[in-house]
Image: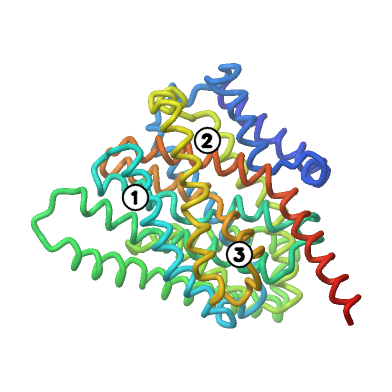
Amino acid sequence: MDELNIVVTAIGAIVLFLGLLSDYFRRNWWTSDPLTALLLGLLLGPIGLGLVNPSAWGIPQEQLLEQTARFTLAIGLMGVALRLPKNYVFRNWQPLAILLGLVMPMMWVISGLIVYWILKIPFWEAMLVGATITPTDPIVSTSIVTGVVAEDNLPRRLRHIISAESGANDGLAYPFVLLCILMLKPSSGDVLSHWLIHVVLWEVGIAVLFGIVFGYIAGYLLELAERKGTIEQQSFLSYTIALSVTVLGAAKLLGSDGILAVFVSGLAFSYVVSGKERAEEDNIQEAINRFFTLPIFILLGLTIPWREWLALGWWNLILLVVAILFLRRIPAILLLHHYIRPIHNLQEALFVGWFGPIGVAAIFYAGYSVQQVRVEEVWLVCSLMICASILAQGLSATPLTKLYGEYMNRKHQSQTTNE
């Protein structure tokens, strides 16, 4: 009971602290909310003061992480969907198709091969590890593309494309993860045909269809209630949270991809509701996001397998982190950036390529994968890369964003002088 109260106190304290000082820290200390919460978890956990030890709670660690990450993603993805402009996905289907249809599979293959080469584990186990760290995380991305520093220095087209990709590819990583799991499980049937029919067509297809229908109906009912005067202003606070959780649970009951369904429902919902309501929902969602998304990073800090990391050896540890951070995403973006319209030049391609963080989605897929096939390397590598990504991209977000803003100002001044 004391440990639970410590965790509850820590969650409340970090939200209060960041609510008061987040802009100051982001401007002057080059840190991010997820990184601050992660450090707090490290401080409280076995690696720090030893005040909280989740392994003694009697709940399987992978199950605790998976379910916590699942609900965190649902809240975060709804926030991303509401933050995007109306019809954004339809108007930008081509760059998103390249990011999701070409860049994302390349990220999976590159990550899997790096793990296979460095850790020397079986091929499909390595590809499973690669699949779990493939999706760019909407929770960590939000801390990069929102706030005063991002709004002052980054054009909307870059902020929106990063947000849209991070929202969509969380759910679309599911087929890659399931393919690897099916290849690792003993089966007497045709694995590829089962994967194509059951996973891609049914689980992913139904998630998209269900998300569209449910999100549209939810938006229509909200508009109707507003016209009829049956809804109180305060009800907006709970409406999108209820929509996120309902879609997440109902999609799972249908046997489909709940993470993808939540994001699609958010897009459909935002398409229906009026501009005034969308703005209000967006403000509310951003306000509650911090409270619902920070606890997962505290939990991550409490459960870091640091002894297993050290068992990899320092050389393998460093090589794995550097190789994945720099090769997982940047080469694919550089290769295809000419076809991604929101990216205008090489500097922007490098920026978008670097800021494809690994985060809560990887925690969710790692927890799910470990329960399915007991490949311990999944959590080992995922936890390592999540922490490395939060540290590297959290610390670099403010300086690189300001550097990009300065570059654009110099470019604009140069063009004005020439004219």
Residue at 24% across / 42% down in the picture?
Answer: 122
CA neighbours of label 2 inside 10 A, class few (<14), some (14 to 19), many (20+): many
- Residue under label 3, please give it: 349
Q: Residue 127 at what x, y percent from top left?
A: 31, 50
Left or right position of 111 against 292? left
User: Does 55 appear above or below 106?
Assistant: above
Task: Tell me how far mark 3 sits from mark 1, CA to CA.
Answer: 23 Å
Left or right position of 149 against 48? right
Q: Earlier in the sequence, mark 3 or mark 2?
A: 2
Q: How is the image coloured?
A: rainbow
Q: Quadrant of the C terminus?
A: bottom right
User: Does 153 appear above or below 323?
Assistant: below
Q: Residue 330 at what x, y percent from top left?
A: 53, 57
Q: Quadrant of residue 82?
A: bottom right
Residue at 37% across / 53% down in the picture?
Answer: 131
Say what secondary structure mark 2 lies in: helix
Q: Amino acid at mark 3?
A: Ala
- Residue under label 1, please give it: 113
Q: Residue 194 at what x, y percent from top left?
A: 20, 65
Q: Amino acid at mark 2?
A: Leu
Q: Quadrant of the N terminus?
A: top right
The reply to whether dot 3 and dot 2 touch (C-beta < 8 Å) is no
Q: How many marks?
A: 3
CA neighbours of label 1 inside 10 A, class few (<14), some (14 to 19), many (20+): many
- Residue under label 2, please give it: 300
Residue at 70% across / 56% down in the picture?
Answer: 286
Say what secondary structure mark 3 lies in: helix
